[in-house]
C-alpha cells in the first residue's frame, strides 16, 4: 500500500451574503400573510422567527448564497436560478469547477495530471450525465469520473474512497469536488430549517507519496473511516418518484419533499455518535483526542460541536483547537469541514495531527486522520 497525501485544496464561496435579520424579516412577513389566511380557518397560527433564536439554535449569523435573488421575496422564498441549455455548462458543474481550479493551482499540477474526479455532495443537480463527468470535461482531466452522495458526510466519504483508490494503486491522482448549492433545496418557509444553510464549493486532490517523500506544509492521510446508521430524523424526499403519487403531474408539489429534520433528536443522537466515532477512530491508531492538534468538524451547529468535543476531551475546547466558520457561512453541508481545514492549517507544525470529521443525514459520519509533513 502506498502512502497518500492531500496535495491541493480549493474553496469557492459566493460573494452574496444574507444576514439573519434580512432572512427573519422576509420569513415573518410571509408568516403574517399566512396567519391572516389561517385565522379564517381556525387553524393554529405560525410562529415568527428571530435572530436570537437562530443564533442560539445554530450559531449562524449570516450565510453566503450562490443566487440571492428571490430568497427574500415573501411571495417566492427560493433563489431564482435560470435553467440552461444542455450544451452549456450546468450551474452545479460551474460551481464545482471554480473550487477545482483553485485546488489544481494549490497543488501546482495540470488538470490532465488528475485521472479521476469524484463529485461527492449532499445533493446532485441531476442523475445523469454525472456532474463529475461534466466537471471532468470542463477541466480537461484524464481517466474517469463518477458521482456519489452521503448527505453532509459526502466530502469525507469521497475522501475515504479517494484515499483507498490511491493507496491501493488503482488511481494515480483523485480530485474530490463538493459543490453545495444547498439553498436550492431548502424550504425557506420552514421555521426549523430556513436559517441553517449556505452555499459553498470545495475540492481536494489526493495523490501518492514516494518512500521518504515529505512535503512541508502538506498533509499525509494516515487513515480514513466511515460509519452509517439509518435514521429519518434528517430527510429529503425529493426524487424522481415523487411526482408519481400526485394526480396532477404537470406540477410537482415540493411541500414535504424538501429538507426537514427533527432538530432535538438529531442533536442528541449525532452528538453521542460523533463522540464515539472520534474516540474509537483515534484509539485504533493509538491516539486520544488530546493528541490531536486540530479538529475540523462538520459546520452544522456550534452547540453540537462544542458538546462532542467536551465529551471527547472532558472539558470545553476553543476555536484554536476546533475552528468554526458556520457563524459567517452557515451550514455549507459537506463543504463545511473542508473549508475549516483550508482556512485553519497553515500554523500547524510538522508532526502535528488533525482530524476531519463530518456527520449528517443517514445518519452518516466520515473521518480522516491527517499528519502535517
Image: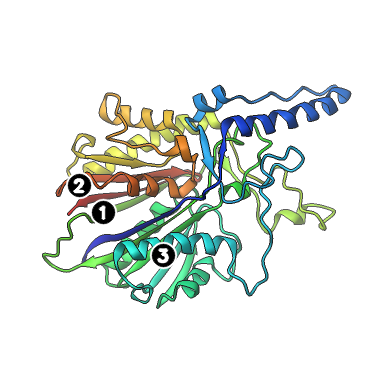
Q: Is residue 92 visible?
A: yes
Residue topped by disc 2:
285
Image spot of residue 329 (x, y percent): 48, 41
Residue topped by disc 3:
101
Compared to 346, does 103 lie above or below? below
- When asked about the image quadrant of residue 296, the answer is top left
Q: Earlier in the sequence, mark 3 or mark 1?
A: 3
Image mark for residue 223: 1
- Residue at image location 50% in from the left, 24% down from the top: 56
Give the structural element (helix, strand or loop) at label 2: loop
Q: Earlier in the sequence, mark 2 or mark 3?
A: 3
- State if disc 1 and disc 3 touch (CB < 8 Å): no
Q: How many marks?
A: 3
Give the structural element (helix, strand or loop) at label 1: strand
- State if disc 1 and disc 2 touch (CB < 8 Å): yes
Residues at marks 2 and 1, CA–CA distance in whole angstroms: 9 Å
Residues at marks 3 and 1, CA–CA distance in whole angstroms: 26 Å
- Decide which of 11, 155 is in the foreground and name it: 11
Taking the image as shown, residue 90 lies to the left or right of residue 229, namely right
Image spot of residue 187 (x, y percent): 66, 41
Q: Is residue 1 visible?
A: no
Name the quarter where the N terminus is drawn.
bottom left
Give the structural element (helix, strand or loop) at label 3: helix
Q: Residue pushed farthest right?
A: 40
Name the quarter where the C terminus is drawn.
bottom left
- Residue at image location 70% in from the left, 57% down from the top: 241
Image spot of residue 99 (x, y percent): 43, 59
Amino acid at each position: 500500500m502506498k502512502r497518500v497525501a492531500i496535495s491541493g485544496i480549493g474553496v469557492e464561496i459566493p460573494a452574496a451574503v444574507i444576514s439573519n435579520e434580512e432572512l427573519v424579516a422576509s420569513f415573518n412577513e410571509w408568516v403574517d400573510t399566512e396567519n391572516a389566511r389561517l385565522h379564517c380557518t381556525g387553524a393554529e397560527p405560525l410562529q415568527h422567527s428571530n435572530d436570537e433564536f437562530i443564533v442560539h439554535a445554530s450559531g449562524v449569523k449570516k450565510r453566503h448564497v450562490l443566487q440571492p435573488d428571490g430568497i427574500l421575496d415573501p411571495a417566492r422564498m427560493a433563489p431564482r436560478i435560470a435553467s440552461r441549455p444542455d450544451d452549456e455548462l450546468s450551474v452545479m458543474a460551474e460551481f464545482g469547477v471554480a473550487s477545482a481550479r483553485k485546488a489544481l493551482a494549490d497543488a501546482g499540477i495540470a488538470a490532465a495530471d488528475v485521472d479521476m474526479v469524484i463529485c461527492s455532495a449532499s445533493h446532485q443537480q441531476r442523475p445523469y450525465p454525472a456532474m463529475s463527468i461534466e466537471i471532468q470535461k470542463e477541466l480537461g482531466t484524464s481517466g474517469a469520473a463518477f458521482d456519489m452522495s452521503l448527505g453532509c458526510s459526502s466530502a469525507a466519504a469521497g475522501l475515504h474512497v479517494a484515499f483507498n483508490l490511491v493507496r491501493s494503486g488503482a488511481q494515480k491522482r483523485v480530485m474530490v469536488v463538493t459543490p453545495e448549492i444547498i439553498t436550492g433545496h431548502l424550504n425557506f418557509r420552514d421555521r426549523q430549517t430556513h436559517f441553517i444553510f449556505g452555499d459553498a464549493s470545495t475540492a481536494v486532490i489526493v495523490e501518492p507519496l514516494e518512500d521518504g517523500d515529505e512535503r512541508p506544509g502538506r498533509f499525509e492521510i494516515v487513515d480514513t473511516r466511515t460509519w452509517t446508521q439509518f435514521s429519518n430524523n434528517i430527510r429529503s424526499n425529493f426524487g424522481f418518484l415523487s411526482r408519481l403519487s400526485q394526480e396532477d403531474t404537470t406540477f410537482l408539489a415540493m411541500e414535504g419533499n424538501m429538507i426537514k429534520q427533527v432538530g432535538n433528536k438529531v442533536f442528541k443522537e449525532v452528538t453521542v455518535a460523533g463522540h464515539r466515532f472520534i474516540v474509537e477512530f483515534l484509539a485504533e491508531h493509538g491516539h486520544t483526542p488530546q493528541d490531536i492538534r486540530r479538529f475540523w468538524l462538520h459546520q452544522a451547529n456550534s452547540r453540537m460541536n462544542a458538546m462532542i468535543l467536551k465529551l471527547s476531551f472532558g472539558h470545553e475546547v476553543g476555536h484554536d483547537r476546533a475552528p468554526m466558520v458556520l457563524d459567517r457561512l452557515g451550514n455549507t453541508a459537506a463543504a463545511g469541514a473542508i473549508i475549516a481545514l483550508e482556512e485553519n492549517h497553515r500554523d500547524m507544525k510538522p508532526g502535528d495531527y488533525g482530524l476531519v470529521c463530518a456527520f449528517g443525514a443517514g445518519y452518516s459520519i466520515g473521518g480522516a486522520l491527517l499528519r502535517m509533513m
